[in-house]
Amino acid sequence: MSRKLKCQICGIKDDREKIKIKQGYCHRDKCYDQYLKQEEFKQKEKEQKYELYETIKRLHNIAIIPHQFFPYIEALRNGDIAFGKIKKQYKQGFTYNVIDKTYKHCNSNIDWAKDNKDFRGSTMNMLKYTFTIVQDKINYINSKIEKQQMQKAHVDKIGDAMKPDDHDVEYRKTKNKHDISKFLD
Ligand SMILES: [Zn+2]
């Protein structure tokens, strides 16, 4: 009898041959879609986080971000410190993309702080200071982006409804299908 292994998605133990996949363990039938979605999410998070860190480095003229600063960003991402409340959560806060856009929006405020504030040569002091600027503006940027996305979704919807060509194609497709089905009957 083969050793039972735990599925990464549902947590249920099963025979190796049922749950072994290339990168780990997951039920090949019922849990695989969920696994792919999770991997896609992780990949997207990684890319957006990379972009954000590049932005932070560029705006502050620094080559590396001190690792002590990472928890600040993660707290914002997880939603631990959103709306003035502190609670432990996972990926419930602002997306890395929104944080990135907020940093970019605060570009001139960050420049001003760099020129006028005394951080005593500490990158961490500087990052903590500009972080409060970003925190201050993030709700505003977030709702602005949400509004834009809603408007875009609305425009797309109208656009789809107004495409006569697609309707024609769809109609022809349906007609063909019916024609073929005649032969199948
Ligand atoms: Zn499973």
Image (cartoon, rainbow, N blue to C red):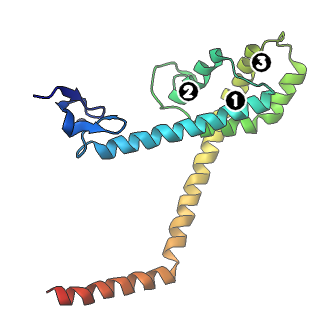
Q: Is residue 55 visible?
A: yes
Residue occupying the point 37% across, 44% down? 36
In the image, residue 149 lies at what x, y percent? 57, 53
Tell me the number on the disc at residue 82. 2
Against 40, residue 16 (above or below) is above
Mark 1 touches mark 2? (CB < 8 Å): no
In the image, residue 59 lies at what x, y percent? 78, 32
Identified by mark 3, the residue type is Met
Secondary structure beneath label 3: helix
**Some atom of ligand 1 lies within 8 Å of the CB belonging to the residue at label 1:** no
Tell which circle, 1 or 3, labels the residue nearer the N-terminal end.
3
Q: Alpha carbon of mark 1 to alpha carbon of mark 3: how far?
A: 12 Å
Secondary structure beneath label 1: helix
Tell me the number on the disc at residue 126. 3
The quadrant of the rendering that contains the C terminus is bottom left
In the image, residue 72 lies at what x, y percent? 61, 20
Identified by mark 2, the residue type is Ala
Tell me the number on the disc at residue 49. none
Q: Label 2: few (<14), some or many (≥20) within 10 Å?
A: some
**Residue under numbered circle 1:** 134
The answer to which of 142 and 95 lies nearer the viewer is 95
- Horizontal arrangement in the rendering, residue 119 relative to residue 28 (left or right): right
Callout in the foreground (1, 3): 3
Identified by mark 1, the residue type is Val
